[in-house]
Image (tube, rainbow, N blue to C red):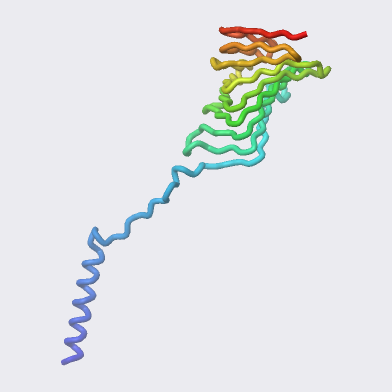
Amino acid sequence: MLFRLFTVLAVAALAISTWILSSPAHRPRPVQNAGSTDLPGYYLKNTVLTDYDEAGMPTLRIEAERIDQVAHTPEVVLNNVQVNYLGQNGQNWVMFGDVAHVQPGGKSVDVSGNVRLQGESVDHAPAAVVRTDALTYDVTDSIARTKSDVRIEFGAHTLTARGLVANLKERTMRLESKVNGRFQP
């Protein structure tokens, strides 16, 4: 009889504990990954991205020390970036910056922090160097522009202005306002 009483008590204890543990208050909650939204969706190190024209010739090469996807979106951030515009007839431009954002679709690259844009030619003739804090490069039209202060250095000559539009295909620059030049012999 003691054995039957023990069995009934064990079954009752099992039923009560199952009922208590299966209640909504005791169900395990999904563990949220702490800071998962802070982590990049992907990242690349020491990367070179190249864009080609219809003839298969390279037109744009972007080199970056590190590329991070922004919060699981199509936008990416490039650190310590170099953007090379590879024009026809060897008329190239190089843009350097601390950080660049490539907008979804890859039609625009926003470069900021110690931005430097300089022309390169096949004959290694001296080229102008543009310095500014931010520059936007339109990939489709090959136009770099800023509304920030710019400093253009060409040998011993210096021009300063606010705002710049540089057409890299046509190798032209237009200064927007507050233009000031200093030409030293």
Q: Quadrant of residue 134?
A: top right
The residue at the far front in this view is 185
Residue drawn at 69 percent across, 25 percent down: 84
Asked if residue 73 shows in the view, the reply is: yes
Residue drawn at 64 percent across, 37 percent down: 65
Quarter holding the N terminus is: bottom left
Count how many numbered circles sit on residues in the image.
0
Viewer-side residue, 53 vs 155:
155
The residue at the far right in this view is 123
| Residue 129 against residue 177 in the figure, above or below | below
Residue drawn at 26 percent across, 62 percent down: 26
Q: Quadrant of residue 179?
A: top right
- Image location of residue 185, percent across then percent down: 78, 8
- Image location of residue 59, percent across then percent down: 69, 23
Q: Is residue 72 left or right of residue 162?
A: left
| Residue 165 against residue 1 in the figure, above or below | above
Residue drawn at 73 percent across, 20 percent down: 92
- Image location of residue 122, percent across then percent down: 81, 19
